[in-house]
Structure formats: structure tokens, C-alpha cells
Image (spheres, rainbow, N blue to C red):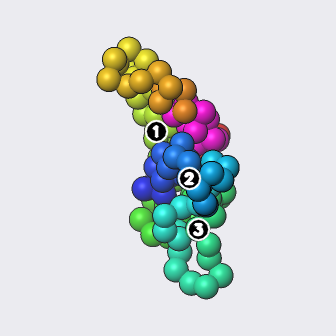
């Protein structure tokens, strides 16, 4: 379910629209969950993400999958705390971004 990964990993990157402009967060997905002119790249709700899992991948219990992904994210963040290769500032940014992603498993 790559869209969930997209939701929680790209939001730490900022950009500016013009030189000297304010830093902005890109709060959109790279791709639409579903094709069509009425579908958007906006972050999906939990229900939309579960619907995506059911319709596109045939997942019968998508909430359980989202819970497993959230558990793996927690485990990864715990391991990163002791990894000198992951700068503390990046850990902080990731932790803040992942908080929103954990909501998908609730």
C-alpha cells in the first residue's frame, strides 16, 4: 500500500515557490489513488485508503494491514534513535510526520 508510505514520508520535505519565499510543505500524494477527473492527489482519509486497499489490491481487512504498517513504523523509529547514521534533526522531522500516519491505524 504505497500511498500510505507516500503520505508519511514526503511531508518532511519543504520547498519554496520563488527565491526567498517561505518554505512550504507538499501535502499531496505523488499520484492519485484512483484515476479520473473527480479524484485528487490530496491526502486520503483512513476510509479512502482502506477503500483503495480493498478495490485495487483485494485486501479483505485493510485496517489490519494499516495497523501492521504503523507497528513497523514505530519499530523503525525506535531503531533509528540508536543509529548514528540518522541525524537527530531528521529523526525529529520523521517522528512528527509519522504521527499523522499513525492515525491511519486507529
Residue 2 counted in the magenta span: no
Residue 11 in percent (x, y) is at: 55, 47
Disc 2 or 1, which lies upstream in sequence?
2
- Taking 34 as reference, is 28 above or below it? above
Residue 41 in percent (x, y) is at: 58, 68
Disc 2 or 3, which lies upstream in sequence?
2
Residue 77 lies in quadrant: top left
Residue 101 in percent (x, y) is at: 58, 42
Give the residues in magenta.
Answer: 94-103
- The residue at which mark 1 appears reads as 68
Separation of disc 2 and disc 1 at Cα? Answer: 31 Å
The residue carrying pointer 1 sits among few (fewer than 14), some (14 to 19) or many (20 or more) residues within 10 Å by Cα, namely: few
Which part of the image, by quadrant, shows the C terminus? top right
Q: Secondary structure at mark 3?
A: loop
Q: Residue at 61% across / 61% down in the picture?
A: 17
The residue carrying pointer 3 sits among few (fewer than 14), some (14 to 19) or many (20 or more) residues within 10 Å by Cα, namely: few
Q: Secondary structure at mark 1?
A: helix
- Main SS class of the magenta portion in the image: helix
Residue 101 counted in the magenta span: yes
Residue 76 lies in quadrant: top left
Q: Residue at 61% across / 85% down in the picture?
A: 37
Residue nearest the viewer, comparing 85 with 24? 24
Q: Are marks 2 and 3 in contact (CB under 8 Å)?
A: no
- Taking 6 as reference, is 86 above or below it? above
For this orientation, the residue located farthest to the front is 20
- The residue at which mark 2 appears reads as 15
- The residue at which mark 3 appears reads as 41
- Taking 83 as reference, is 47 above or below it? below
Disc 1 or 3, which lies upstream in sequence?
3
- Mark 1 or mark 3, which is nearer to you? 3
Amino acid at each position: 500500500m504505497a500511498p500510505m508510505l507516500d503520505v508519511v514520508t514526503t511531508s518532511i520535505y519543504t520547498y519554496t515557490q520563488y527565491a526567498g519565499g517561505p518554505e512550504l510543505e507538499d501535502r499531496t500524494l505523488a499520484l492519485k489513488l484512483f484515476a479520473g477527473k473527480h479524484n485528487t492527489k490530496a491526502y486520503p482519509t483512513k476510509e479512502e485508503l482502506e477503500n483503495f486497499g480493498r478495490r485495487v489490491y483485494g485486501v479483505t481487512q485493510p485496517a489490519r494491514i494499516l495497523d501492521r504498517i504503523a507497528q513497523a513504523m514505530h519499530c523503525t523509529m525506535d531503531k533509528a534513535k540508536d543509529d548514528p547514521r540518522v541525524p537527530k534533526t531528521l529523526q525529529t522531522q520523521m517522528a512528527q510526520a509519522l504521527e499523522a500516519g499513525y492515525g491511519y491505524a486507529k
